[in-house]
Image (cartoon, rainbow, N blue to C red):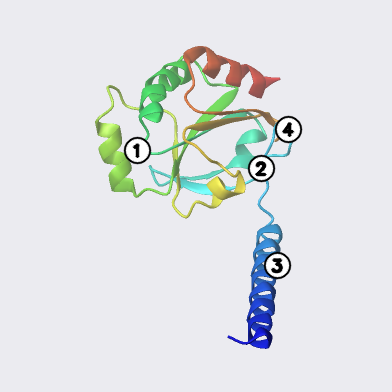
Amino acid sequence: MKKGTRKIIRTGTIITIAVLLGVTLYLNLRDGTQTVNVGDDAVDFKLETLDGEELQLSEITAENGVILNFWGTWCKPCREEMPEMNQVYNEGHEDYEIIAVNVSENPQQIEQFLSGLSEDLDYPIALDSNRSVTKAYNIGPLPTTIAINKEGVVVKKQEYQLTKEDIYAFIDESLE
């Protein structure tokens, strides 16, 4: 191959790589995805529950603290923390609400999962079928739990499974 031809191919390759890198950076920065951190305002949302009711975060936080628990049926730690979360919820939830946000699974999968639990869950299960809320909160590993106070501010966030003591701490944080 001639020296001039090699130079043209090399230059073309470098320009192509630079353009692709620029487009990738532009698309990633333009996306605007941000992690919701402690101290940030909660992202408001409206989701349907497994029972067919509509649930809006801002309406709940107007009166109560909220614990959002993002989960999936395939997630073993999710299965393990749900009964304890239900026990704590049934001890009294006048000042707070626990909402289990299922990440993009169909109601049949969820019902089948719930029928395999040792007890019925009494707190609402919201369906994030298109993952809009999961994306808005930039949720990674499941389970992830977020506490939001009555002012609509994220006050606590934890990835991975909660213990019963963790659940009480989330409730306390949402009420402060």
What is the spatial separation of the Cα atoms under label 1 and label 2, in whole angstroms? 24 Å
Query: Label 1 is placed on what type of residue?
Result: Thr
Q: Nearer the viewer, residue 24 or 114?
A: 24
User: Label 3 neighbourhood size at 10 Å, few (<14), some (14-19), many (20+)?
Assistant: few
Q: Residue at x 25, y 32 (%)?
A: 115
Q: Which residue is mark 2?
A: 35
Q: Nearer the viewer, residue 14 or 69?
A: 14
Q: Which residue is mark 1?
A: 73
Q: Nearer the viewer, residue 50 or 113?
A: 113
Quarter residue 146 falls in: top right
Secondary-structure class at tag 4: loop
Query: Label 3 is placed on what type of residue?
Result: Gly
The earlier-in-sequence mark between 4 and 3 is: 3
What is the spatial separation of the Cα atoms under label 4 and label 1, in whole angstroms? 31 Å
Q: Nearer the viewer, residue 53 or 12?
A: 12
Quarter residue 84 falls in: top left
| 102 is higher (above) or lower (below) than 117 | below
What is the spatial separation of the Cα atoms under label 2 and label 4, in whole angstroms? 19 Å
Which label lies toward us, 3 or 1?
3
Q: Which residue is mark 3?
A: 22
Q: In the image, residue 68 lies at what x, y percent?
A: 54, 33
Contact between labelled residues 3 and 4, with CB atoms less than 8 Å apart: no
What is the spatial separation of the Cα atoms under label 2 and label 3, in whole angstroms? 23 Å
What is the number of callouts on the image? 4
What is the spatial separation of the Cα atoms under label 3 and label 1, in whole angstroms? 39 Å
Q: Which mark is residue 151?
A: 4
| 160 is higher (above) or lower (below) than 2 | above
Contact between labelled residues 2 and 1, with CB atoms less than 8 Å apart: no
